[in-house]
Image (cartoon, rainbow, N blue to C red):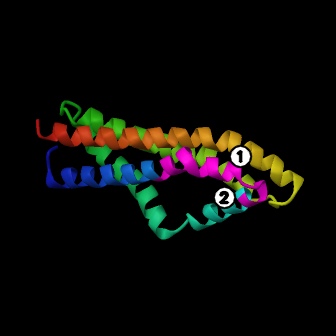
Amino acid sequence: MNTPIITFGLGLLILGSAVMAGLFFVFSNFAMNSFARIRPEAGISAMQAINVTIVNPWFLALFLGTAFGSVAIAAPALFQMSHPASVWILAGALFYCIGCIVVTGACNVPLNNLLAAVDPASADGLEMWNRYLREWLPWNHVRTVATTLAGAAYLVALWKLKE
């Protein structure tokens, strides 16, 4: 289990999880609260722009690359469950893949799509914005915690590799 590839992979997964946790933390801690304090039209327009701009090669490589890396590193851990690092690797993979990827796809992206379809200056836009703020943010908190826990689990796994 303690190979240079596993060690390097865990290092990348720690970094990937940490960067994603930081991104989600920014939105949970102050970005969405800031958008909620400005004119709804401006908040809607800002989120619409962010939701378009974030889909870029750098973000997707980090977001999906960390997921693929999580699955790739979990496979050998499943076959070496007696190793002290295995349970931590599997925990990290589950936190990342479920708490980040599944929650994003099932909860945040559908709300992003609904927000994208409204005119920021319309009554429907205001109604959707209120719903968006109410529903999107708690799921983002889940992603923040999940990616933080994934990074922490991968860090413990790295320590356990030395045992």
Determine whether, in the image, residue 49 is placed left or right of residue 66: right
Image x and y of residue 126, in percent: 82, 51
**Dot 2 crowding, Cα within 10 Å, few <14, some 14–19, many 20+:** some
Q: List the residue tagged with mark 1.
A: 132
Question: Looking at the image, which residue is at 77% across and 54% down?
Answer: 40
Q: Amino acid at mark 2?
A: Met
Which secondary structure class fits the magenta region best?
Answer: helix
Q: Which residues are magenta?
A: 23-42
Q: Depth check: 95 or 90 in front? A: 95
Amino acid marked by disc 1: Tyr
- Residue 147 picture quarter: top left
Callout 2 secondary element: helix
Who's the residue at 56% across and 48% down the image?
Answer: 30
Q: Which residue is mark 2?
A: 47
Q: Residue at coordinates 60% horizontally, 38% vertically from top-left? A: 138
- Please determine whether, in this image, residue 84 is positioned above or below residue 1: above
The picture places residue 109, in percent across and down from the top left corner, at: 63, 51
- Name which of mark 1 and mark 2 comes first in the sequence: 2
